[in-house]
Image (cartoon, grey):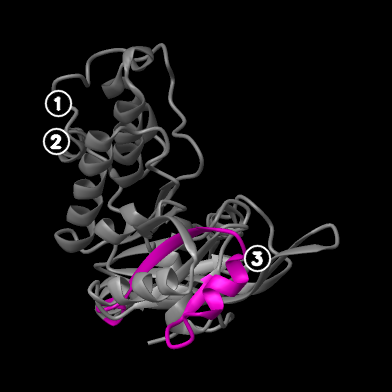
Amino acid sequence: MEAVLQIKGLNKYFGHKKVVDDLNLELYRGEVFGFLGPNGAGKTTTIKMVMSLLQRDSGEILINGYSIDKQYEKAMACVGGIVENPETYQYMTGIQNLRQYARMRTGVTEERIREVVRIVGLENRINDKVKKYSLGMKQRLGVAQSIMHHPDLLILDEPTNGLDPAGIKELRDILKRLAHEENACVMVSSHLLSEMQLMCDRVGIIADGRLIGVRSVSELMSESEGKHQFEIRVKGNVSAAAALIDDKPVEITGEQTFHVTVANEDEISGIITRLVINQVKLITVTEATRNLEEVFIELTGGEGGHQIG
């Protein structure tokens, strides 16, 4: 596969705090890559360094083989993106915004502008002023701005923030089409793990500035099949109750709750019987939602700093 983005040994400090820690990563043409982690994990900081919006302390970044230090203009000509919120002129129409942005890029024709309007689905509202746009429409306009010059690398930081479910699905379809049909490399950062599961081909988890690892979404989900996690809420001594389940993975999660992982849902009835026989007072037993981050950390053992697979 052709690597569009290569990050080697990337480090960043804010004061004495290390916010990006020896990050190594490769992204490829034709994929949607999900850069996942909780707020404050280092996602936006990494993206700003890739886009040369923030100085790094050490490490190397290559885009299409061009170093952003030695061949800055060639490297950045390959990139489009939105960090935080799309920048637009509110008093201008959507089409006027795109034409204004096109003047900053080489070779963007009126035909290409109309093409990106169709791609993002703004044909019916492109002549309206941006101040009348919904948040979802502004996001679509921002994507249109970002892809006008046919970037090889499209980077979007938390693009689904504030969007309703319909808007999220529309954006998801646009990004998958750009990667899979136009052969771009799309990098999307988010903390919405369930949404990334539907959008991405591969995901990487970052926590406390360190990359835990990289896996394909299909690999993550296939490896996690056959595992069901239940939350059991009890009245009384939760540690004593959890200790009765000595043949299954158990984790105490609260003053009254613990999680138990079983191979199939039928096994939970035997666990409930065991607890009741031992006079444990049950409050609730519910199947717990397992997100991609939990699955990922479980499969990788929580080890950081390297790329897997």
Instruction: Categorize mark 2 by other alpha carbons within 10 Å: few (<14), some (14-19), many (20+).
Output: some
Q: Earlier in the sequence, mark 1 or mark 2?
A: 2
Residue 83 in sight here: yes
Indicate the amino acid at tag 1: Glu
Q: Which residue is mark 1?
A: 123
Return the residue at label 3.
Answer: 208
Magenta region includes residue 249:
yes
What residue is shown at x 42% (from left), y 82% (from top)? Answer: 299
Foreground disc of the pair 2, 3 = 3
Q: Is residue 157 left or right of residue 207?
A: left
Q: Which residue is mark 2?
A: 118
**In 3D space, how far apart are the residues under numbered discs 2 and 3 (Cα atoms)?**
40 Å
**Could you tell me the amino acid type at mark 3?**
Asp
Give the mark nearest the N terminus, 2 or 3: 2
Q: Amino acid at mark 2?
A: Arg
Stretch in magenta: 223-251
Task: Please identify the quarter of the rendering in which residue 3 is found.
Answer: bottom left
Q: Position of residue 57 (x, y in %)?
A: 74, 67
Q: Residues within 10 Å of mark 1 (few under 14, many from 20)?
A: some
Nearer to me, 213 or 102: 213
**Circles 1 and 2: CB distance less than 8 Å?**
yes
Quadrant of the drawing holding the N terminus: bottom left
Q: Which of the marked residues, 3 or 1, is nearer the chain's N terminus? A: 1
Residue at 42% over, 83% down:
248
Mark carried by residue 252:
none
Figure check: 285 above or below 214: above
Q: Is residue 154 magenta?
A: no
Q: Nearer the viewer, residue 137 or 114?
A: 137
**Mark 3 and mark 1: span between their CA atoms?**
42 Å
Element assignment for label 1: loop
